[in-house]
Image (cartoon, rainbow, N blue to C red):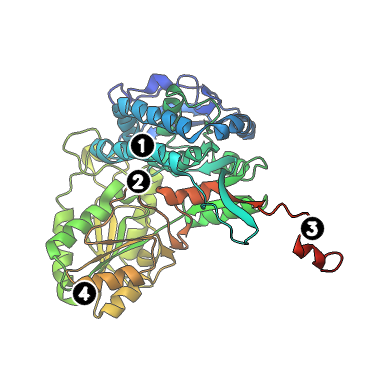
Amino acid sequence: MQHPGNATPKRFPAQERFADGAQFVAGRLTKGTSGRTHTVVDPATGEDAYTYELAGTDDVDAAVAAAREAFGTWAGATPGERSDAMHRFAAVVAERAEDFARAESLQCGKPLKLSREFDVPGSIDNIAFFAGAARHLTGQSAGEYSGDHTSYVRREPIGVVGSVAPWNYPLQMAAWKILPAIAAGNTIVLKPAEITPLTSLLFAQAATDAGIPDGVINIVTGTGREAGEHLVGHPDVAMTSFTGSTAVGKRVAAVATATVKRIHLELGGKAPFVVFDDADLDAAVNGAVAGALINTGQDCTAATRAYVQRPLYEAFVERTAALMETVRLGDPFAAGTDLGPLVSHAQRERVAGFVDRARAYARVVTGGQAPGGELAAGAYYRPTLIAGAPQDSEAVQAEIFGPVLVVLPFDTDDEGIALANDTPYGLAASAWSRDVYRTGRATREIRAGCVWINDHIPIISEMPHGGYKASGSGKDMSAYSFEEYTQLKHVMFDTTAVVRKDWHRTIFGDR
């Protein structure tokens, strides 16, 4: 049964929109049929915010059927028609921006200023970008490549897309999955994380209210093991896109390949933050704290490994620790809050476990504990700086996914770049230097899908996001994402009107 829990209207002004359930199929909210419920918990207070029925396999089947039925009409719409609908979609989300921001902060624990200034406007910008990009889905220009034929390439939608999104950026991940898919003419079934479904559902409702046809966007809110695996392996799903951990990504790939469908994976990260000895130290310290603590460190591109050339190392450690200690933990809805809780108490205990084990081989310079007092009921953890960890330790090699930065020294440029590349991951990285040749080398030699120079974290709709190595394959955002969501068809016309072609002799008769 659905109930709003203890969230106040101030924290959750859109709660009335969820009265009919947490599944969005064929343009309307319905209740899940798994027979089990789940409660969204406010991680800042530990209080229940919303309880709903989880999706079962029947709900996934219904959502896929709705997407399949809608595909022909949506794929047959002109690029201009799809573009116009998506522009209206952007306008509706903009009108409801505050509802989106508060729902995102409620379910994730992120400060309201982050939701208002990053998550929501970034998602609106994504919609506007793909509304325009929908008009530019072209193939290769026509040409007579054989001499006797005219060839051209059609770019066509794939069909029904089944996507699985993570809990750290529920709204932005819904946008990243849904927008390129529908701009290209596909329909989609998205499974958000069951602990953070609220803004994905608001997103789908806004799309319908903007006039995007029923069945084009569907949301099934269930567990990964039940709803997620059934969606990924569904025979009527032509492609799956997954964002999450590398371990789960391997399972997704195994299930999806059993039905020979296209796979797009955006997986874990362990981003290096390389500071050369000619860098602006103040800029690097500020960048490291911001890059490590964004979203309470629950960001696959967050700065997690700072490699600092020896002449700057001690000063960097000292100043970074001092700046971390000024960061204000608090209620995500309070005006003075810089850092909110982690998404759940379970995630906080996971992060604390990494830090506690690191005490045996490294120095915890600052942080390393949960706050008490009025924050004790929430999933809070203090910003943490670890120094002196060996390169092969788990604090350096594993994805902690919390407000933790590990700092290590290096001596030569060769060593710094080698250390940056010395993990299984390759999603993002940054390099800090005033020397254009050093930074140019870093952009060439660091193996990551994004390399920032003298900054860390900014993303833009026009540029692709995706990783190397164990961080996955394929791209989100930008026009490059259409490579994931379209298939190419070669069309070839004879231009000669000759009945008996010269090449026919290789099959029958003589010249």
Residue at the spot of label 4: 309
Callout 4 amino acid: Gln
Label 4 secondary element: strand
* Residue 193 visible, this angle: no
Front position among marks 1 and 3: 3
Residue at the spot of label 1: 128
Front position among marks 1 and 4: 1
User: Alpha-carbon neighbours of circle 1 within 10 Å: few (<14), some, or many (≥20)?
Assistant: many
161 and 415: which one is in front?
A: 161
User: Alpha-carbon neighbours of circle 3 within 10 Å: few (<14), some, or many (≥20)?
Assistant: few
Residue at the spot of label 3: 500
Q: Are marks 4 and 3 in contact (CB under 8 Å)?
A: no
Label 2 secondary element: loop
Q: Residue at x 64, y 45 (%)?
A: 233
Label 3 secondary element: loop
Q: Are marks 2 and 1 in contact (CB under 8 Å)?
A: yes
- The label on residue 265 is none
Whole-angstrom CA distance, mark 1 to mark 4, is: 42 Å
Whole-angstrom CA distance, mark 2 to mark 1, is: 9 Å
Callout 1 amino acid: Ala
Callout 2 amino acid: Ser
178 and 153: which one is in front?
A: 153
